[in-house]
Image (spheres, rainbow, N blue to C red):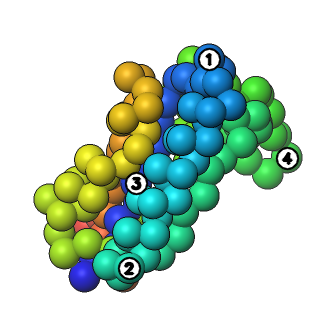
């Protein structure tokens, strides 16, 4: 099994129009999804993210801080999962309740590097 990160992107306001009943339905669907992933041994961790935050950039001595939400789309949560390969991770992501409850959801499926690998061009000496 390999590790993957599912980054849940959605419109920051995608659930503002949910009634309390719809919100409860969505949260229950998330619980069922998480329970299913736990039982199958595919879930490492999962958490929603608060929509507010800051983006920092710079380097030592000169740091800049800006509001996180500079566009209408934000990362609203993540799932750290185990899957046999990328196609398996994608099939897990497709079952996420975000797709059923909002039309603006997108899930970024990314393999997690578990050993040191060269990820950039190495210039000869």
Query: Residue 35, position in %: x, y?
Result: 45, 69
Would you place residue 14 above or below residue 124 in this image?
Answer: above
Looking at the image, the residue that sits furthest to the right is: 61
Q: Residue at x 57, y 47 (%)?
A: 27
Q: Which residue is mark 3?
A: 6
In terms of secondary structure, where does tag 3 sit?
A: strand
Q: Which residue is mark 4?
A: 61
Q: Quadrant of residue 80?
A: bottom left
Query: Residue 93, position in %: x, y?
Result: 31, 52
Mark 1 or mark 2: whose residue is earlier in sequence? 1
Q: Which residue is mark 2?
A: 39
Q: Quadrant of residue 106?
A: top left
Q: Nearer the viewer, mark 4 or mark 2?
A: 2
Mark 3 or mark 2: whose residue is earlier in sequence? 3
Mark 4 or mark 3: whose residue is earlier in sequence? 3
Q: Nearer the viewer, mark 3 or mark 2?
A: 2
Gap between marks 1 and 2 measured at Cα: 32 Å
Mark 1 or mark 3: whose residue is earlier in sequence? 3
Q: Quadrant of residue 117?
A: bottom left
Q: Looking at the picture, tell me which residue is in the foreground, 117 or 1.
A: 1
Q: Residue at x 43, y 39 (%)?
A: 98
Whether residue 116 is visible here, answered yes or no, is: no
Gap between marks 1 and 3 measured at Cα: 25 Å
**Label 4: how many Cα within 10 Å (few below 14, some 14–19, many 20+):** few
In terms of secondary structure, where does tag 4 sit?
A: loop
Query: Residue 16, position in %: x, y?
Result: 65, 21
Would you place residue 3 above or below residue 46 in this image?
Answer: below
Mark 4 or mark 2: whose residue is earlier in sequence? 2
Q: Residue at x 19, y 75 (%)?
A: 84
Query: Residue 34, position in %: x, y?
Result: 46, 64
Q: Which residue is mark 1?
A: 17
């Amino acid at each position: 099994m390999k590790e993957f990160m599912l980054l849940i992107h959605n419109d920051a306001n995608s659930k503002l129009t949910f009634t309390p009943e719809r919100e409860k339905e969505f949260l229950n669907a998330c619980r069922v999804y998480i329970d299913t992933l736990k039982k199958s041994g595919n879930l490492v961790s999962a958490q929603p993210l608060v929509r507010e935050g800051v983006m920092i950039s710079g380097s030592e001595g000169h740091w800049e801080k800006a509001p996180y939400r500079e566009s209408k789309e934000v990362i609203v949560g993540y799932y750290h999962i185990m899957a046999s390969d990328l196609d398996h991770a994608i099939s897990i992501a497709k079952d996420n309740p975000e797709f059923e409850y909002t039309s603006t959801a997108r899930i970024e499926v990314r393999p997690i590097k578990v050993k040191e690998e060269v990820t950039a061009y190495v210039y000869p000496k």
